[in-house]
Each structure stands twice: as C-alpha cells, then as structure tokens.
Image: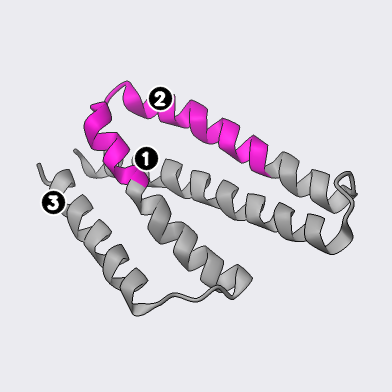
C-alpha cells in the first residue's frame, strides 16, 4: 500500500470512530435527559449518521484501489481511536491490558501495510 492509500484508509477509520464516539454521547444525553427527541440528542445522532454515511462513501472509493483484505485490516484501528477518544471525552479507563492490545494492533497493521 502506498502512503496515500494508508492515509485515506486511516482517515476513513477515524471518521467511523468519531461516529462511534458520537453515538456514545447520544446514549449519555438520553440517560441524562430521558428525552429521546431533545435537540441535543437528535442533533448529535444526526451528526453521527452523517459522518457514518460519508465514511461509507469514502470506504467504497478506497476499495476501488485497495484489496479488501488489506483495507479491512485497518478497521482494527477503530479500537485504538475509540479507546483514546473514550478516555479523553468520557473519562473511561485504559488499563495496561488495553494498552498492550492496542500496541499489538498497531504492530500488526504495520506488518500488513508493508506487505
């Protein structure tokens, strides 16, 4: 894979991860307000769906030039992005086991992308 292909693929995975973090925010907002149809809940949910939709279109574009088995391997980066985002935005814990797992994911992707 070229650097540009890796960049495009990682950008798509990052967008999907942002969507996941927004879905978590929606669930927090629902729990806090008990109102499914509040502006904050619907606005955040709509933004998450929009980002997911754009990421899906972007993913289809990526698959035109990258084999699926290589591109899909990069979806594992969503574990890294979501773990970091959940720590920053939601104060969720990152244990040593999680850190080791995330490092292994990154090492595996480096191995695959140099194939």
Q: Position of residue 43 (x, y in %)?
A: 80, 46
The reply to whether the C-beta atoms of the residues labelled 1 and 2 are less than 8 Å apart is yes
Q: How many marks?
A: 3
Q: Residue at x 37, y 40 (%)?
A: 8
Tell me where residue 49 sits by quadrant. top right
67 part of magenta stretch: yes
The scheme the figure's colours follow is: one colour
Q: Which residues are magenta?
A: 48-75
- Provide the residue designation for mark 1: 8
Tell me which label, 1 or 2, sits earlier in the chain.
Answer: 1
Between residues 108 and 62, which one lies in front from this camera angle? 108
Residue farthest along the top direction in this orientation: 64
Q: Secondary structure at mark 2?
A: helix
Between residues 66 and 74, which one lies in front from this camera angle? 74
Q: Residue at x 9, y 41 (%)?
A: 115
- Provide the residue designation for mark 2: 61
Residue 96's place in the image compared with 98, above or below, is below
Between residues 52 and 38, which one lies in front from this camera angle? 38
Tell me which label, 3 or 2, sits earlier in the chain.
Answer: 2
């Amino acid at each position: 894979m070229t650097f540009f292909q890796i960049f495009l693929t990682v950008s798509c995975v990052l967008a999907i991860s942002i969507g996941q973090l927004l879905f978590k925010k929606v669930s927090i907002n629902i729990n806090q307000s008990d109102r499914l149809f509040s502006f904050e809940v619907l606005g955040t949910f709509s933004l998450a769906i929009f980002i997911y939709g754009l990421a899906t279109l972007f993913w289809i574009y990526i698959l035109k030039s990258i084999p699926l088995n290589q591109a899909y391997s990069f979806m594992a980066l969503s574990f890294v992005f979501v773990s970091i985002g959940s720590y920053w935005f939601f104060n969720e814990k990152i244990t040593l086991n999680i850190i080791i797992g995330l490092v292994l994911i990154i090492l595996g992707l480096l191995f695959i992308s140099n194939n």
